[in-house]
Image (tube, grey):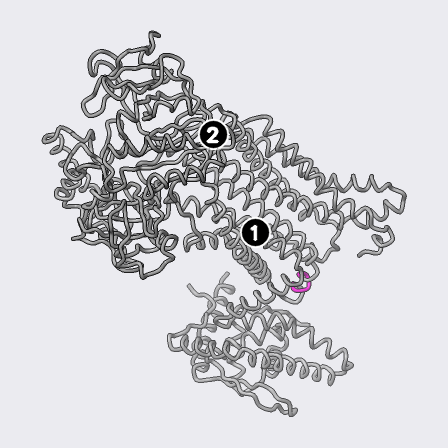
Amino acid sequence: MPGNTELLHGTLELLILRVLRASALHGWGISKHIREVSRDMLQINQGSLYPALYRLEREGMIAAEWGTSDEGRRAKFYTITRAGLAQLATEETEWRRFALAIELVLTSA
Amino acid sequence: MISPPKPRRGILLSIIYISAGIRQWLDRRRFERDMDDEMRFHIDMEARDLASSGLSPDDAKARALVTFGGQARFKEEARVDLPLHWLSDLRDDLRYALRSMRRTPVFTTVAILALGIGVSANTTLFGLADAAAFRPLAVSRPNSLYAVAGQQSDGSPLTLSYPTYLDIRAGVPAFADVAAFTERMVSVNSDGTPVGAWAAHTTDNYFSLLGLRPAVGRLTRPGDHDTPVTVLSHAFWQTHFGGNPAIVGKAIRVNGAPFVVIGVAPPGFSGTRLFTFAAALWFPIGMHAQTLPGSGDLLHIRERARFHVLVRLADDARAESARHQLGAIVAQLARDHRGANGESGLLLLSNRTAINPWLASPERLRMIGLLSLAGGWLVLLIACADVANLLLARMTTRGREIATRLALGASRGRLVRQFLTESVLLAAFGGAAAVPIAMVALRASQGLTPPLDFAPSFSPAMDGRALAVTGGIALASALLFGLAPLLHALSPDLARMFRASDHHKPGASRSRQVLVVVQVATSVVVLAVAGLFARSLDAARRIDVGFETGHAIAFTVDPSLLVGYDQRRVDELYRRIDASLRELPGVQSVARASSIPLDGTTSTARVLAGEALPTTQAIVADCFYVSPSYFGTLGIAVVEGRAFGPADTAGVERVLVNETLARRLWPSGTMGGGQRVWLDSLGGSRVEVIGVVRSHASRQLGDRPRALLWRSLERNRLSRATVIVRATDDAERLIPGARRTIQALAPDLAIVGLRPLREHIAVAYSAAQSGAIGGFVLGIVASLLALAGIFGVVAYTVSRRAREMGIRSALGARTSHLIGLMVRSGLRPTGIGILAGLGIASAMPSSMSAILYGVSPRDPVVLLGASGLFFIVSTVAAFIPAWRGARVDPRRALQLD
């Protein structure tokens, strides 16, 4: 498996919001999507997604609804809310600034 | 500074968050189900995905489960985020704890019983100490209640005269109100049989100052100064009038005069002073001609200081300013009346609790209080050690369960909380069990008070305060006994410890042994103290009190309480009582005295030797007024001179002194025989010493002999007297005859305390006796709890080493050898404990000798006896499980595990 990267605390939520901005998805869908776009570089225990999902739901960043999956099974679908979009925007900006700062330090050293 | 961003949350979001949380918590069952469904869906999808990439269905499923991770942990994590989650956690913990308690009924019962005993010992001792010293009076705002007393030159307090009370009332603005009262027995007749009852005679503002409300009717109030009314105490109303409210408005006869009952005082109120009798009735002081007959003018003479003064400090005043204003009154008294009362100052004393300045020997009380509290704590410590021991033993058997929970993802914090919940629950049950035990013990402790003429004002009870203390102690004990298992739960290699087979856990078994050492040591100390008290009681019983206590009865009467009984009729009645009692079959002699030595009452006189007053230092002597036959009846030897005779009622007053007083009056050795001394009371008078009497105990057992003085009862014409009747053999048979005789002579005369003489002086033994009984009970309880601990350790060893024993037995070891092996495992900590206990007990403070008679606090017989006894019974306690263990069939033992 290519380079393993541990998730920084709190970044899982950011990723979830980012994935949900594109489309509504169920938990497994989100998990698979993150794995695919990160080319399996982000190695997380798949189950740890759920506490984060419930937290976001309680904070009103995402909304959940039970529906039917493509395979015809009952599944819980998550959509991003307006509050979630706003949160995503601020966090994205801050992350970029943080990443830039780290980058600057690393290249200047 | 830049840090990884954290989600920020506004107030609105917080509200959404909380309300969503509450909603989720409310339908948490659906939340659980949804979580299950969602996770199962995820794993199924993952497995399908993996299967489509070529894995077998089974492998795919297994792989999916692994990549998902511990479901239980994620669920737990999701739940922890729920607000109010701790509440459902607590409920789960409680349910779990209850279930595991039900699963081990023996453990649970033993633990609850041990805790119940340990906690109840403390509740009981607290109840006693609280009633004696700490409980605020049952009046409104006890904090601003004070007493004012005169101050003698030696600092001891004095009662005050009515005029002085009026001065204080008028002259101290810092006092919102001032009341006064005096106490004395009255004869109450409501149904034909007169009873003696303790009564308080009060100023009309007494109840309003205290802020009391009546239980029935009304209380005396300003304006009731000289109306013939009375207020009953709740207890007296219950015992003598069956709690019937119809008594209000009816008249009862008090000392032969009618008084209307206007109401009943609130329950629990029996006056404001400890160590006196509980007041049964209250009367307006203005009626003292009827209620205190023969007392003369109480209200106008400054020399007659009989009043206790009670004050209510004004809301905006401070005790300091009140003391200052009292000082001005003292100065004025000294100027105008030259200290007619004999006081050199006025004391302002807090009357928040019933403990009052007239208390004897506070050091003694403090010592007794400290010892009791220490005893209670020791017993609780032993009980906690027992429970900790049991918990540790259970921990090892619960190892697998705990390991499983850890493996399933339970956090360490969660486990700790679980243990705590179990401990607290156990303690709660223990505390609940303690309440009835303490109630019984408190009631029994009242039986320890010696027989008294009236009920004492001391009333320990299982009230709210005692309940609160019980709860607190139970909780504290939970922390104490829950500590050991908790430490094990927190130890870093917990999982490994529990996963390993149960055979060798040096940690747990070492702490169990340490606990037994502590238990044994404490028990030996408690047993030693109990032994000291037992020896002390024995010694007290054998102390020669100096007079004959067997084969006699005594009772107290006061004919002057009867309406129409002047001095002449009183004298006449006594003559007839003497004569009639002498005629009873079995009566040897009859005598009268103002009081009996050792019965708890004393009066004193100041005596001066020499020709002029006052040339030498006055000697304070205990003073008794006695009839001529007194010395013969009590078997007190007159060693020089003679006793009183019929001629001693007139002329120069004649007195007798004891050897101690004689030695102090005439150190040169010329004793008694017609010498004159000064008696210093109200100006002083010269009296002649006609005899010297052998010294005997007068106030307390084992006292150094005090100076004693006897004056003639008949000459000084005291109307209240204790009559002593000596029988030729069994005195108790005389009691009914004596009662009939008195009732025939004076139908309205109340007879107080008619019982054997020995019981009258039991007051003097009561400290030694209460100590012996209390110490004995504590000692037994402590030892039983410690023995349970030893039994437990050996039983545990036996069960742990069953396989080893089986092998040894199969290899031919003798049973006796095996028993010895296992008994030794219990006796090692016992031996260490006994040695430690001996060490502590032999360091007992020598101040303890203040409450012991004729025995040193480090009495070797007691110390060795206590440890020897303990060693024997603990060997038995260790032997029983060892013997049972060794008899197990080796084949069965080997199959175990």
The one of B664 and B589 positioned closer to us in this rendering: B589
Residue marked by disc 2 = B727
Residue type at mark 1 is: Leu
In the picture, residue B35 is in which quadrant? bottom right
Range covered by the magenta-colored residues: B402-406
Q: Give how far apart the Cα atoms at labels 1 and 2 are.
A: 52 Å
Residue type at mark 2 is: Ala
Mark 1 packing: few (<14 Cα in 10 Å), some, or many (20+)? many
Q: Is residue B405 magenta?
A: yes
Is residue B147 something one can see in this rendering?
yes
The correct choice, above or below, for B198 with respect to B630 in the image is below
Q: Is residue B269 magenta?
A: no
Residue B140 rendering spot, x and y as whole percentages: 28, 54
Give the chain letter at badge 1: B
Camera-near label (1 vs 2) is 2
The correct choice, above or below, for B853 with respect to B312 in the image is above
Residue at left offset 30%, top offset 52%: B232
Is residue B848 something one can see in this rendering?
no
Q: Give the number of the disc on residue B115.
A: 1
Mark 2 packing: few (<14 Cα in 10 Å), some, or many (20+)? many
